[in-house]
Protein backbone atom coordinates (compact mmCIF):
# COMPACT_ATOMS: atom_id res chain seq x y z
CA UNK A 1 0.00 0.00 0.00
CA UNK A 2 1.05 3.33 -0.64
CA UNK A 3 0.43 6.90 -0.26
CA UNK A 4 -0.08 8.15 -3.49
CA UNK A 5 1.67 11.08 -4.57
CA UNK A 6 -0.22 14.20 -5.76
CA UNK A 7 0.76 16.12 -2.72
CA UNK A 8 3.24 18.84 -1.91
CA UNK A 9 5.64 16.13 -0.83
CA UNK A 10 5.26 14.43 -4.18
CA UNK A 11 6.43 17.43 -6.22
CA UNK A 12 3.76 16.80 -8.84
CA UNK A 13 3.40 19.52 -11.45
CA UNK A 14 -0.30 20.32 -11.59
CA UNK A 15 -2.35 23.47 -11.84
CA UNK A 16 -4.65 24.17 -8.91
CA UNK A 17 -7.87 22.21 -9.29
CA UNK A 18 -9.92 25.37 -8.90
CA UNK A 19 -8.26 26.77 -12.04
CA UNK A 20 -8.72 23.52 -13.97
CA UNK A 21 -12.41 23.35 -13.09
CA UNK A 22 -12.92 27.02 -13.89
CA UNK A 23 -11.81 26.68 -17.49
CA UNK A 24 -8.95 24.24 -17.97
CA UNK A 25 -9.06 20.69 -19.23
CA UNK A 26 -10.90 17.80 -17.61
CA UNK A 27 -9.49 16.47 -14.34
CA UNK A 28 -8.75 12.75 -14.51
CA UNK A 29 -8.05 10.28 -11.72
CA UNK A 30 -5.68 7.49 -12.73
CA UNK A 31 -6.58 4.45 -10.65
CA UNK A 32 -4.68 1.15 -10.46
CA UNK A 33 -6.75 -2.04 -10.63
CA UNK A 34 -4.29 -4.83 -9.90
CA UNK A 35 -6.71 -7.76 -10.18
CA UNK A 36 -7.74 -6.74 -13.72
CA UNK A 37 -4.23 -5.51 -14.71
CA UNK A 38 -5.55 -2.09 -15.69
CA UNK A 39 -5.01 1.60 -15.19
CA UNK A 40 -8.49 3.15 -15.09
CA UNK A 41 -8.92 6.80 -16.13
CA UNK A 42 -11.88 8.35 -14.30
CA UNK A 43 -13.35 11.79 -14.95
CA UNK A 44 -13.73 13.95 -11.84
CA UNK A 45 -16.15 14.62 -10.34
CA UNK A 46 -18.62 12.77 -12.61
CA UNK A 47 -17.06 9.34 -12.05
CA UNK A 48 -17.35 8.51 -15.76
CA UNK A 49 -14.72 6.01 -16.91
CA UNK A 50 -12.81 7.64 -19.76
CA UNK A 51 -10.43 4.81 -20.61
CA UNK A 52 -8.98 1.50 -19.40
CA UNK A 53 -5.33 0.88 -20.22
CA UNK A 54 -3.88 -2.62 -20.12
CA UNK A 55 -0.89 -2.89 -17.78
CA UNK A 56 1.73 -5.57 -17.03
CA UNK A 57 0.74 -7.95 -14.23
CA UNK A 58 -0.09 -6.52 -10.81
CA UNK A 59 -0.16 -2.73 -11.32
CA UNK A 60 -0.19 -1.32 -7.81
CA UNK A 61 1.09 2.23 -7.56
CA UNK A 62 0.99 5.32 -9.74
CA UNK A 63 2.39 8.85 -9.74
CA UNK A 64 2.10 11.74 -12.19
CA UNK A 65 5.29 13.67 -12.99
CA UNK A 66 4.68 16.49 -15.45
CA UNK A 67 3.20 14.92 -18.59
CA UNK A 68 4.01 11.34 -17.60
CA UNK A 69 2.28 8.87 -15.32
CA UNK A 70 4.47 6.09 -13.95
CA UNK A 71 2.60 2.86 -13.15
CA UNK A 72 4.50 0.23 -11.17
CA UNK A 73 3.61 -3.44 -11.75
CA UNK A 74 5.09 -5.46 -8.93
CA UNK A 75 4.68 -9.06 -10.12
CA UNK A 76 5.80 -8.22 -13.67
CA UNK A 77 8.84 -6.26 -12.43
CA UNK A 78 7.86 -3.42 -14.75
CA UNK A 79 7.28 0.33 -14.83
CA UNK A 80 4.88 1.65 -17.47
CA UNK A 81 5.17 5.25 -18.68
CA UNK A 82 1.86 6.74 -19.80
CA UNK A 83 1.41 9.99 -21.72
CA UNK A 84 -1.10 11.94 -19.61
CA UNK A 85 -2.18 14.17 -22.52
CA UNK A 86 -3.25 11.25 -24.74
CA UNK A 87 -3.72 8.52 -22.11
CA UNK A 88 -1.55 6.20 -24.19
CA UNK A 89 1.31 3.95 -23.11
CA UNK A 90 4.66 5.38 -24.16
CA UNK A 91 7.00 2.67 -22.93
CA UNK A 92 7.24 -0.33 -20.61
CA UNK A 93 10.50 -0.61 -18.68
CA UNK A 94 11.40 -4.04 -17.33
CA UNK A 95 14.24 -5.65 -15.41
CA UNK A 96 13.25 -4.67 -11.87
CA UNK A 97 13.22 -7.07 -8.93
CA UNK A 98 10.13 -5.94 -7.04
CA UNK A 99 9.43 -2.30 -7.97
CA UNK A 100 6.96 -0.59 -5.75
CA UNK A 101 6.59 3.16 -5.17
CA UNK A 102 6.99 5.91 -7.81
CA UNK A 103 7.64 9.55 -6.93
CA UNK A 104 8.75 12.70 -8.76
CA UNK A 105 12.02 14.57 -8.53
CA UNK A 106 11.87 18.12 -7.19
CA UNK A 107 12.24 19.57 -10.69
CA UNK A 108 9.64 17.18 -12.12
CA UNK A 109 12.01 15.86 -14.80
CA UNK A 110 12.79 12.48 -13.25
CA UNK A 111 10.78 9.63 -11.78
CA UNK A 112 12.09 7.74 -8.77
CA UNK A 113 10.98 4.14 -8.16
CA UNK A 114 11.86 2.03 -5.13
CA UNK A 115 12.71 -1.66 -5.63
CA UNK A 116 12.04 -3.69 -2.46
CA UNK A 117 13.81 -6.89 -3.50
CA UNK A 118 17.03 -5.24 -4.66
CA UNK A 119 17.05 -2.39 -2.14
CA UNK A 120 17.47 0.11 -4.94
CA UNK A 121 16.19 3.51 -5.99
CA UNK A 122 15.80 3.63 -9.78
CA UNK A 123 16.06 6.99 -11.55
CA UNK A 124 13.96 7.18 -14.73
CA UNK A 125 13.67 9.74 -17.50
CA UNK A 126 12.42 7.99 -20.61
CA UNK A 127 14.63 5.08 -19.54
CA UNK A 128 16.45 4.01 -16.39
CA UNK A 129 19.48 6.29 -16.00
CA UNK A 130 20.72 5.12 -12.58
CA UNK A 131 20.11 2.57 -9.83
CA UNK A 132 21.27 3.42 -6.31
CA UNK A 133 21.42 0.95 -3.42
CA UNK A 134 19.59 2.51 -0.45
CA UNK A 135 18.81 -0.59 1.64
CA UNK A 136 16.84 -3.81 1.22
CA UNK A 137 13.09 -3.38 1.50
CA UNK A 138 13.13 0.13 -0.04
CA UNK A 139 9.45 1.00 -0.20
CA UNK A 140 7.53 4.19 0.64
CA UNK A 141 9.21 7.40 -0.40
CA UNK A 142 8.85 11.07 0.56
CA UNK A 143 10.18 13.97 -1.52
CA UNK A 144 10.99 17.30 0.12
CA UNK A 145 9.11 20.17 -1.58
CA UNK A 146 11.97 22.65 -1.16
CA UNK A 147 15.20 20.74 -0.50
CA UNK A 148 17.06 18.08 -2.53
CA UNK A 149 16.16 15.28 -0.14
CA UNK A 150 14.30 11.96 -0.18
CA UNK A 151 13.31 9.85 2.80
CA UNK A 152 12.78 6.17 1.97
CA UNK A 153 11.25 3.66 4.40
CA UNK A 154 13.09 0.34 4.24
CA UNK A 155 10.04 -1.92 4.20
CA UNK A 156 6.32 -1.66 4.93
CA UNK A 157 7.33 -2.32 8.55
CA UNK A 158 10.53 -0.30 8.41
CA UNK A 159 13.02 -0.17 11.26
CA UNK A 160 15.12 2.34 9.34
CA UNK A 161 14.58 5.22 6.92
CA UNK A 162 17.25 6.10 4.33
CA UNK A 163 18.00 9.74 3.54
CA UNK A 164 19.06 10.46 -0.05
CA UNK A 165 20.59 13.65 -1.46
CA UNK A 166 19.16 14.65 -4.86
CA UNK A 167 21.07 17.89 -5.50
CA UNK A 168 21.81 16.26 -8.85
CA UNK A 169 18.40 14.62 -9.48
CA UNK A 170 19.88 12.19 -12.00
CA UNK A 171 22.68 11.10 -9.64
CA UNK A 172 21.26 10.77 -6.11
CA UNK A 173 23.41 9.46 -3.29
CA UNK A 174 22.77 8.04 0.17
CA UNK A 175 23.72 10.38 3.04
CA UNK A 176 22.29 8.80 6.18
CA UNK A 177 19.52 7.06 8.07
CA UNK A 178 16.70 7.91 10.47
CA UNK A 179 15.47 5.79 13.36
CA UNK A 180 11.66 5.90 12.98
CA UNK A 181 11.12 4.86 16.62
CA UNK A 182 8.84 2.02 15.55
CA UNK A 183 7.82 0.02 12.48
CA UNK A 184 7.35 2.82 9.94
CA UNK A 185 4.96 2.45 7.02
CA UNK A 186 4.27 5.66 5.07
CA UNK A 187 5.93 9.06 5.21
CA UNK A 188 5.54 12.52 3.69
CA UNK A 189 7.12 15.95 3.97
CA UNK A 190 4.78 18.66 5.19
CA UNK A 191 4.39 22.11 3.59
CA UNK A 192 7.68 23.98 3.67
CA UNK A 193 9.67 20.76 4.03
CA UNK A 194 10.64 21.35 7.67
CA UNK A 195 8.63 18.43 9.05
CA UNK A 196 8.24 14.80 8.00
CA UNK A 197 5.14 12.87 9.04
CA UNK A 198 5.72 9.14 9.55
CA UNK A 199 2.94 6.55 9.98
CA UNK A 200 3.31 3.05 11.36
CA UNK A 201 2.32 -0.53 10.66
CA UNK A 202 1.80 -1.16 14.37
CA UNK A 203 0.10 1.33 16.68
CA UNK A 204 -2.52 4.05 16.23
CA UNK A 205 -0.18 6.98 15.83
CA UNK A 206 1.66 9.24 13.45
CA UNK A 207 4.95 10.81 14.47
CA UNK A 208 6.28 14.16 13.24
CA UNK A 209 10.05 14.48 12.72
CA UNK A 210 12.28 17.49 12.22
CA UNK A 211 13.61 17.15 8.66
CA UNK A 212 17.02 18.60 9.59
CA UNK A 213 17.80 17.06 12.99
CA UNK A 214 15.83 13.87 12.11
CA UNK A 215 14.48 13.78 15.65
CA UNK A 216 10.82 13.21 16.61
CA UNK A 217 8.92 16.32 17.67
CA UNK A 218 5.33 15.21 18.27
CA UNK A 219 3.06 12.17 18.24
CA UNK A 220 -0.61 12.26 17.18
CA UNK A 221 -3.42 9.71 17.37
CA UNK A 222 -4.23 8.56 13.83
CA UNK A 223 -6.49 5.49 14.06
CA UNK A 224 -5.87 1.86 13.16
CA UNK A 225 -2.64 1.15 11.27
CA UNK A 226 -1.32 1.29 8.67
CA UNK A 227 -2.11 4.92 7.95
CA UNK A 228 -1.21 7.09 4.96
CA UNK A 229 -0.72 10.84 4.82
CA UNK A 230 -0.90 13.68 2.28
CA UNK A 231 -1.00 17.47 2.31
CA UNK A 232 -2.89 20.06 0.26
CA UNK A 233 -0.48 22.48 -1.45
CA UNK A 234 -3.07 24.88 -2.90
CA UNK A 235 -5.79 25.21 -0.28
CA UNK A 236 -6.08 28.53 1.57
CA UNK A 237 -5.98 26.62 4.83
CA UNK A 238 -3.21 24.02 5.10
CA UNK A 239 -4.16 20.59 6.36
CA UNK A 240 -2.68 17.15 6.79
CA UNK A 241 -4.95 14.29 5.65
CA UNK A 242 -4.36 10.95 7.36
CA UNK A 243 -6.28 7.84 6.32
CA UNK A 244 -6.97 4.72 8.32
CA UNK A 245 -8.23 2.16 5.83
CA UNK A 246 -9.20 -0.32 8.52
CA UNK A 247 -11.21 2.36 10.35
CA UNK A 248 -12.70 3.67 7.09
CA UNK A 249 -11.75 7.16 8.23
CA UNK A 250 -9.93 10.29 7.09
CA UNK A 251 -8.56 12.45 9.88
CA UNK A 252 -7.93 16.09 9.00
CA UNK A 253 -5.30 17.98 11.01
CA UNK A 254 -5.05 21.77 10.83
CA UNK A 255 -1.57 23.18 10.19
CA UNK A 256 0.63 24.41 11.69
CA UNK A 257 -1.09 23.59 15.02
CA UNK A 258 -1.63 19.86 14.14
CA UNK A 259 -4.98 20.07 15.91
CA UNK A 260 -7.51 17.46 14.75
CA UNK A 261 -10.21 19.49 13.01
CA UNK A 262 -12.54 16.69 11.85
CA UNK A 263 -12.89 13.01 11.05
CA UNK A 264 -14.62 11.96 7.81
CA UNK A 265 -16.09 8.52 7.10
CA UNK A 266 -14.69 6.75 4.02
CA UNK A 267 -15.34 3.38 2.35
CA UNK A 268 -13.54 0.60 4.19
CA UNK A 269 -10.07 -0.07 2.80
CA UNK A 270 -9.40 3.54 1.78
CA UNK A 271 -5.70 3.54 2.56
CA UNK A 272 -4.06 5.61 -0.18
CA UNK A 273 -4.75 9.32 -0.32
CA UNK A 274 -3.74 12.09 -2.73
CA UNK A 275 -4.51 15.78 -3.03
CA UNK A 276 -4.89 18.01 -6.07
CA UNK A 277 -5.53 21.68 -5.63
CA UNK A 278 -7.81 21.97 -2.63
CA UNK A 279 -9.42 18.58 -3.23
CA UNK A 280 -8.70 15.17 -1.70
CA UNK A 281 -9.08 11.74 -3.30
CA UNK A 282 -8.82 8.22 -1.87
CA UNK A 283 -9.04 4.71 -3.31
CA UNK A 284 -10.39 1.60 -1.59
CA UNK A 285 -8.43 -1.63 -1.65
CA UNK A 286 -11.48 -3.43 -0.23
CA UNK A 287 -14.34 -2.50 -2.56
CA UNK A 288 -12.85 -0.54 -5.46
CA UNK A 289 -14.45 2.79 -4.61
CA UNK A 290 -12.87 6.13 -5.45
CA UNK A 291 -13.89 8.99 -3.16
CA UNK A 292 -13.32 12.66 -3.92
CA UNK A 293 -13.85 15.30 -1.24
CA UNK A 294 -13.56 19.06 -1.04
CA UNK A 295 -11.18 20.43 1.58
CA UNK A 296 -14.24 21.15 3.73
CA UNK A 297 -15.01 17.42 3.75
CA UNK A 298 -17.97 17.48 1.36
CA UNK A 299 -18.20 14.28 -0.71
CA UNK A 300 -18.07 15.10 -4.44
CA UNK A 301 -17.70 11.54 -5.75
CA UNK A 302 -18.07 8.05 -4.30
CA UNK A 303 -17.97 5.58 -7.17
CA UNK A 304 -16.91 1.95 -7.63
CA UNK A 305 -14.61 1.81 -10.66
CA UNK A 306 -12.92 -1.61 -10.29
CA UNK A 307 -13.05 -4.71 -8.08
CA UNK A 308 -10.19 -3.31 -5.99
CA UNK A 309 -8.40 0.04 -6.31
CA UNK A 310 -4.89 0.13 -4.91
CA UNK A 311 -3.70 3.64 -5.71
CA UNK A 312 -4.76 6.88 -7.37
CA UNK A 313 -3.05 9.90 -8.90
CA UNK A 314 -4.55 12.90 -10.67
CA UNK A 315 -3.82 14.73 -13.90
CA UNK A 316 -5.53 17.17 -16.26
CA UNK A 317 -6.19 16.65 -19.95
CA UNK A 318 -5.43 19.38 -22.51
Image (cartoon, rainbow, N blue to C red):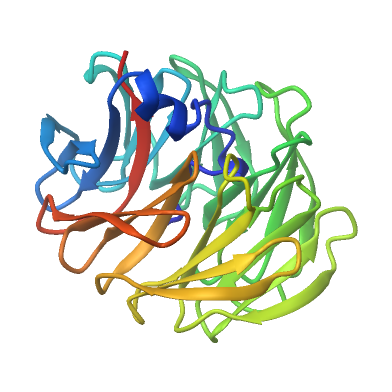
Q: Which residue lies furthest to the right in this view?
A: 213
| Image x and y of residue 281, in percent | 36, 51
The image position of residue 292, as x and y in percent, is 31, 52
Which residue: 34% across, 79% down?
Answer: 246
Percent coordinates x, y for residue 305 in the rendering = 12, 50
Indicate the quadrant where residue 211 lies.
bottom right
The image quadrant where one finds the N terminus is: bottom left
From where the camera sits, is residue 4 visible? no
Q: Can residue 216 be seen in this view?
A: yes
Spot occupied by residue 123 in the image (x, y as percentages of width and height): 55, 27
Q: Check the image and name the residue furthest to the front.
A: 22
**Does residue 98 sit above or below 228 in this rendering?**
above
- Quadrant (top left, top right, bottom left, bottom right) of the C terminus: top left
Number of residue marks: 0
Query: Residue at horizontal 54%, vertical 85%?
Result: 204
97 and 211: which one is in front?
A: 211
Q: Determine the residue positioned at 10% across, 58% down.
A: 307
- Please tell me which residue lies in front, 166 or 218: 218
Is 109 on the left or on the right of 272, as rendered? right
Left or right: residue 92 compared with residue 9: left
For image coordinates 75% across by 61% down, the residue present is 256
- The answer to whether residue 57 is above or below residue 208 is above
Amino acid sequence: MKLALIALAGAVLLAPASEARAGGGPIIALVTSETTNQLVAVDLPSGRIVKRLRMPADPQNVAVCGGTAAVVSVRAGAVTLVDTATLRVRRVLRGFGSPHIPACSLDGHYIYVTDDARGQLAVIRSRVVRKLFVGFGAHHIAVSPDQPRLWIALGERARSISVVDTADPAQPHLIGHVNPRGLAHDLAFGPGGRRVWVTYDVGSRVRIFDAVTRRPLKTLYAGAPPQHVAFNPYSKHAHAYVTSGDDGALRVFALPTTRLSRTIRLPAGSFNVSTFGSFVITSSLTNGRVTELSDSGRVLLDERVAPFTRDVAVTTLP
